[in-house]
Amino acid sequence: MVGIYIHIPFCKQACHYCDFHFTTSLKYKDDLLQALVKEIQLQKNYLQGQTISTIYFGGGTPSVLAAADINLLLDTITGLHTVTADAEITLEANPDDLDKAKLHDLRQTAVNRFSIGIQSFLTMTCNG
């Protein structure tokens, strides 16, 4: 079994401790999502015959994405690969993004785990 990591480079603001590639602008979000879909399609043979047990959305702060954006990527993956029924599907999240409405929307996705970095406990104004 294998896992897939998808880097979502969007953040609400820059954090002083972050060394990852990111942008604070969502201007090209739709372009990036379409590029990710295309890349998943182009790389479908790379994992041919493998069963996916983990899908991890990291970044940046992937929790800035809408549930429909996450579903687009997950539907593309599951349309091309075998994903276990109990796959761990993780979304890195900033606690500030996880209000009641956002959690309700995320229930419409297959995300079943959040990763909330320890830095979020140090300062709730930065995205992690």
Image (cartoon, rainbow, N blue to C red):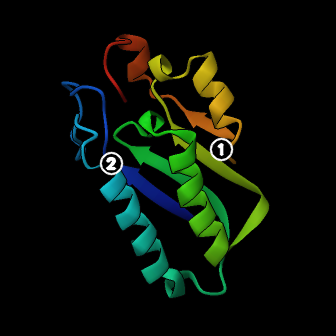
Crowd tier of the residue under label 2, counting other residues whose Cα lies within 10 Å: few below 14, some 14–19, many 20 or above: some
Residue at position x 47%, y 72% in the image: 40
Residue 5 seen from this side:
yes
Please identify the residue farthest to the right as the structure is shown: 85
Q: Secondary structure at mark 2?
A: helix
Label 2 sits on residue: 29
Hey, what amino acid is under mark 2? Lys
Query: Which picture quadrant has residue 113?
Result: top right
Is 94 rendered above or below residue 28?
above
* x and y, in percent, of residue 128 in the image: 37, 30
Residue 1 seen from this side:
no
Report whether 59 appears left or right of 65: left
Q: How many marks?
A: 2
Hey, what amino acid is under mark 1? Val
* x and y, in percent, of residue 29 in the image: 33, 48
Query: Which picture quadrant has residue 91?
Result: top right
State if disc 2 and disc 1 touch (CB < 8 Å). Answer: no
Q: Secondary structure at mark 1?
A: loop
* x and y, in percent, of residue 98 in the image: 55, 22
Is 15 rendered above or below residue 85?
above
From the image, which quarter does the N terminus lie in? bottom right
Label 1 sits on residue: 111
